[in-house]
Image: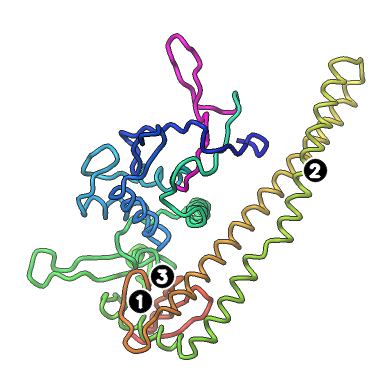
Amino acid sequence: MSHGDRESASRTEKVSLPYKSFLGYRKGADGLPEIVPEEAETVRLIYRLFIGGRTVNYIANHLTQLGIPTPRGKAKWNTSTIESILTNEKYKGSAILQKKFTVDFLSKKMKVNEGEVPQYYVEHSHPAIIDPEEWERVQKEYQLRKSYGKHRNSLSPFSSKIICRDCGSFYGAKVWHSTSKYRRTIWQCNGKFKGAEKCTTTHLYEEKIKELFLSAVSKLTANRQDLIDTCNRLKNEFADTTLLDEQSSALLDETNLLTEMIKKLIEQNASTAIDQEEYARKYNNYAARFEKATAEYEKLQKQKLRRLHQSDILETFAFEIFCLPDLRIEFSDRLWLNLIAHATVYGDERIVFRFKNGVEIEGKL
């Protein structure tokens, strides 16, 4: 849907939901969507888990284990259902109308709208379950994860967070003595035995990881207020995308101009006898400039997305530091996921925690 097709409308616009398979809403007495409180809590839980660093696979398994039924009333959640809930604009109280349209009115055959008919963006069309700012933040995170191409499927917060310094592989969970009373889960380099030489990095126990992480957090927060102030300053710097926006706007103007020039050139060629070599030269020149400007625009948008994502990371990081108790700090998945970028294990039994503000703190295994 192009920018020109996104039109605001009042709440009087008809917003239709497939209520039997749409979590969080039911049809109200006025014909408009109204919130189902218990289902809305599940939607909010999905958003909290995702923005807290959990994968869609983790969320699907977590909801299944909790015994929460899917939108269609099934016991097992699929990742596609979680992704659909995370990306649907209706949860922020808005709606895009005419996502599909009727091709044949006799058979009532529907087709996905790919620009054949206008689409309309309706703001405040119904009550929101997710705050619009939180929804937008989730979209940034979702797109960023897609651009990175990471697919972390483990249910553990340590998944894809601990790196072997020898070979660069992630650490993975392994079960020792799985059939005996000595059963224990350890973390080991996934590539330890794959190369010509075995990695020298040692395995880790979860208790030790947590202990060293909390020790590193204590060192990190020795001057808590200075740390928070620095994070907030960096957050604001990343959030300032004024230059990128100006450059993007100029590129959009250029692509619009080139589109008109190409259109006029084609019309001229259709109505007037002009030299075809000259026509081809001009057309190829315009097309090449258009493709270049479009590629540069997309590159700037990705840069903007990463800057805003980094700003969000630092905001969450600073908030976690602010909320830490003054006395004993306890481990939690949320604390780990919101503070740690990754941890690197060395062959000399060192582990270096890299926090999301760029600070590195070393521990001894």
Q: Which residue is drawn at 46% across and 90% down?
A: 222
* Foreground disc of the pair 1, 2: 2
Seen in the picture, residue 281 relative to 292 is either above or below; the reply is: above
Q: In which quarter of the image is residue 350?
A: bottom left
Q: Residues within 10 Å of mark 3 (few under 14, many from 20)?
A: many
**In this image, 361 relative to 255: left or right?**
left
Residue 201 — which label?
A: 1
Residue 60 within the magenta-colored segment of the rendering:
no
Q: Which image quarter is the C terminus in?
A: bottom left
Q: How crowded is mark 2: few (under 14 residues within 10 Å), some or many (20 or more)?
A: some
Q: How crowded is mark 1: few (under 14 residues within 10 Å), some or many (20 or more)?
A: many
- Report x, y in % for residue 225: 51, 86
Q: Which image quarter is the N terminus in?
A: top right
Seen in the picture, residue 30 relative to 86 is either above or below; the reply is: above
Residue 163 — which label?
A: 3
Q: Is mark 2 on a helix, strand or loop?
A: helix
Residue 14 — which label?
A: none
Q: What element carries label 1?
A: loop
Seen from the viewer's position, the closer of residues 344 and 240 is: 240
